[in-house]
């Protein structure tokens, strides 16, 4: 479904008076400039050569990754919709093995399927011609399975950075590690299902072993949050912050759990129900989502693409955004012995 934009909307511009009613025709008073002043300077060795991708000023590449079932694609698709409706020129790059975006955004149309076959090779050659969802949102995907063309991360990211203000990378644990090395930020999508923590920490531990993991780039999105008595956000973050080897012979700290930035997305039956129903029609829309959910999505949007030009009008963070560890610093964030035993049994399967 295409979403039109008013004549006052331009790519890379946030609306300083944006109110989450998602009626684009009512969005006015666009900000004249946004500057993130972010430069990518990570180098990665490939075939003996040092390779780096330089991102122009005001650009951003954010990678999202999480265990299967934690809602990574759900977060990426809705966040892209939100920011594109605010006038930011956004690209989604589907780097997952299953290629969910292929099934959603090709709309079961031959012309769009054919475009998806060509769009990755187009990025490699400097041509940004993906599936145009709306004026400010383009999706790049291809057939599920192995695709060697996607490994050409240098040219792909270079083309995206030259043509879009924001590139959202929908990743999984099979994604080429170089995409994580070159991203400005890595968003770890985790739920309260602690049984999915071990695969995530094993993945992060491998990034660290390959000297790719930069803790300063890590952000956490706790998805599908609920009000539980025995499980808290801080316990989940504490669980993600360390890798325990299957034999429990050593613990490898992955990042500082007391200072990592994070935000939460609530679990709501109505919101997820609407999302699933629209997938039947291959449609992503924010219409009908609750204000609570949209506010949470907006906070995430402010993390991914900060409104630098108008700091005082930024969405006010909630108490669980970027304040982790500032209060109750003596709280025990560890799981009890019974849960650790359960996790240890699970680790033997990975």
Image (cartoon, rainbow, N blue to C red):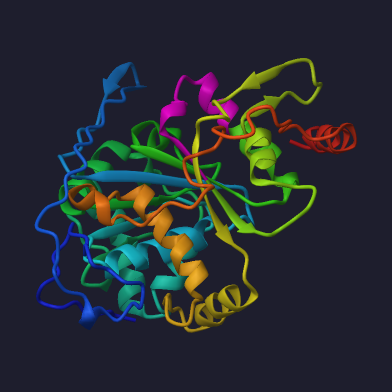
Quadrant position of the C terminus in the picture: top right
Q: Is residue 201 left or right of residue 131?
A: right
Q: Is residue 284 magenta?
A: no
Coordinates of residue 64 in the picture (x, y in percent): 46, 47
Quadrant position of the N terminus in the picture: bottom left
> What segment carries the magenta color?
204-220
Q: Is residue 139 left or right of residue 214?
A: left
* Residue at image coords 75%, 32%: 334
Residue in the foreground of this view, choosing between 161 and 149: 161
Coordinates of residue 35 in the picture (x, y in percent): 16, 45
* Residue at image coords 40%, 44%: 148
- Residue 131 visible in image: no
* Residue at image coords 23%, 67%: 17
Residue in the foreground of this view, choosing between 176 and 196: 196
Res. 56 image quadrant: top left
The relative height of residue 115 versus residue 184 in the rendered view (above or below) is below
The relative height of residue 271 versus residue 58 in the rendered view (above or below) is below
- Residue 217 visible in image: yes
Question: How many numbered discs?
Answer: 0
* Residue at image coords 56%, 75%: 271
Coordinates of residue 160 in the picture (x, y in percent): 23, 49
The relative height of residue 93 versus residue 150 in the rendered view (above or below) is below
The relative height of residue 250 versus residue 86 in the rendered view (above or below) is above
Coordinates of residue 310 in the picture (x, y in percent): 20, 52
Res. 226 image quadrant: bottom right
């Amino acid at each position: 479904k295409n979403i039109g934009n008013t004549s006052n909307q331009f790519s890379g511009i946030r609306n300083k008076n944006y109110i989450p009613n998602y009626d684009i025709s009512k969005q006015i008073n666009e900000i004249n400039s946004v500057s993130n002043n972010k430069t990518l300077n990570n180098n990665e060795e490939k075939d003996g050569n040092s390779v780096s991708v330089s991102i122009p000023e005001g650009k951003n590449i954010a990678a999202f990754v999480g265990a299967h079932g934690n809602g990574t694609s759900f977060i990426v698709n809705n966040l892209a919709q939100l920011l594109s409706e605010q006038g930011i020129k956004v690209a989604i790059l589907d780097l997952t093995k299953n290629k969910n975006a292929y099934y959603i955004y090709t709309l079961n149309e031959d012309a769009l399927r054919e475009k998806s076959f060509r769009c990755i090779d187009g990025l490699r050659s400097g041509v940004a011609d993906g599936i145009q969802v709306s004026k400010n949102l383009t999706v790049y995907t291809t057939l599920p399975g192995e695709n060697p063309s996607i490994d050409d991360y240098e040219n792909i990211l270079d083309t995206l950075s030259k043509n879009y203000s924001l590139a959202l990378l929908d990743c999984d644990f099979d994604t080429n590690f170089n995409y994580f090395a070159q991203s400005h930020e890595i968003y770890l999508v985790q739920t309260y299902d602690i049984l999915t923590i071990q695969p995530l920490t094993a993945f992060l531990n491998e990034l660290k072993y390959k000297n790719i993991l930069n803790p300063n780039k890590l952000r956490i999105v706790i998805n599908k949050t609920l009000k539980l008595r025995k499980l808290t956000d801080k316990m989940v973050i504490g669980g993600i912050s360390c890798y325990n080897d299957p034999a429990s012979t050593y613990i490898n700290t992955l990042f500082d759990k007391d200072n990592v930035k994070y935000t939460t997305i609530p679990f709501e039956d109505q919101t997820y129900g609407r999302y699933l129903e629209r997938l039947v029609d291959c449609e992503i829309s924010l219409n009908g989502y609750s204000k609570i959910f949209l506010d949470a999505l907006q906070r995430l949007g402010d993390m991914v693409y900060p409104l630098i030009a108008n700091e005082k009008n930024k969405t006010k963070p909630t108490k669980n955004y970027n304040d982790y560890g500032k209060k109750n610093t003596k709280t025990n964030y560890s799981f009890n012995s019974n849960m650790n035993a359960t996790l240890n049994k699970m680790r033997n399967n990975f």
